[in-house]
Amino acid sequence: MKRFLRSAAISVFSPLIVASACTRTPPEPTSTSAASSSPAAAAQSVSSSPSEQPARCILATPVTPPPAAAPAPAGRCPKDPNPHLLSMVDLSIETGRGPVPLKAELAHTEAETERGLMFRTQMPEEQGMLFDLGPRREHSFWMRNTCIPLDMLFIDTDGLIVGILENVPTLNDTERTVGCASSWVLEMNAGWCRRHGVRAGQTMKLPH
C-alpha cells in the first residue's frame, strides 16, 4: 500500500509513507469548522485540563460509520511480485470493554513502509500492520495496489489514538488524513475498530 507523508506545507514524496526529519511544534493546528466534509477538517483540540496541559488534536470517531468497503475484485488485484511477512509485535488497546489484544507486522524501514499491505488479498481478524513513522507530524495515506479495505488508526508518541479512518476503500490514490500529528499508524481489516469498541481518544500500548 503506497502512502504519503505530509506536514503543514510540505508533501514529502509521492510513494508511500516514509518519515523524514520534519517536525512540528505543538500545539497542532486544528480546524473548528464542523461543516467541512473532510475528516481532517473536523479534528478538534481536546484538553481535559486546559490550564495544566496543551490541547490535544483528536478527530472524534463518529457515531455512524462510513459505508462498508468491499475487497478488490480478484481480477483487479495486482499480483504480488515478492510475497513476504515482517516481524510481528504484540499490541493492546485499552477500550471501554477492557484491553483488546492484537498482533501486527512492524514496518519501520523505508522499503517496508512504502510497500505496506500492498497486494495482500486477506489478513487474519486479529492481525494488522503497524508503521513506525518516526518524528510526529500530520501523515496522509493512500491505497494504491491495496486490495483489502482497511481501518487506519493514527497514534501519537504516547500511544493516544488521535483519529481513525474507517472502511477505507481499495485500489485508489486518494490521500487521507485525520488532520492531527502522529508517529504511528496501525492498519486493520475494515470494520475491526467497530467490532472491538476501538475509538479515537483511547490508548494503545506501543512496542518497546
Image (cartoon, helix red, strand yellow):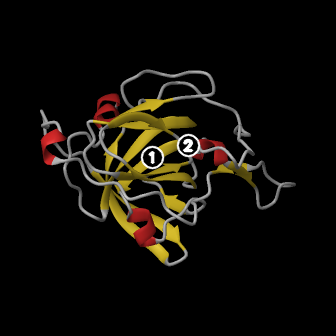
Q: Toward which corner of the image does residue 144 lie, by quadrant? A: top left
Choose between 93 and 37: the one closer to the eye: 37
State the count of labels. 2
Q: Amino acid at mark 2?
A: Ser
Q: Quadrant of the N terminus?
A: top left
Q: Quadrant of residue 190?
A: bottom left
Left or right of residue 98: residue 7: right
What mark, if any, has residue 195 been given in the picture? none
Identify the residue shown where x is 40% and y is 36%.
142
Horizontal arrangement in the rendering, residue 44 relative to residue 150 (left or right): right
Question: Looking at this rendering, what residue extends furthest in the bottom direction?
Answer: 97
Q: Which amino acid does the dot numbered 1 rest on?
A: Val
Position in image of residue 134 (x %, y %): 49, 36
- Check disc 2 and report its element: helix, strand or loop: strand
Quick check: 66 left or right of 124?
Answer: right
Using a 10 Å C-alpha cutoff, classify the residue at mark 2 as few (fewer than 14 neighbours), some (14 to 19) or many (20 or more): many
- Whether the residues at callouts 1 and 2 have beta carbons within 8 Å, the answer is yes
Tell me residue 52's x, y (percent). 83, 55
Res. 180 in view:
no
The single residue placed furthest to the right in the displayed view is 51
Instruction: Judge from the rendering whether residue 4 lies leftward or rightward of residue 52; answer left or right.
Output: left
Whether residue 14 appears in this view of the structure is yes
- Residue denoted by label 2: 182
SS state under label 1? strand
Q: Which residue is mark 1?
A: 185
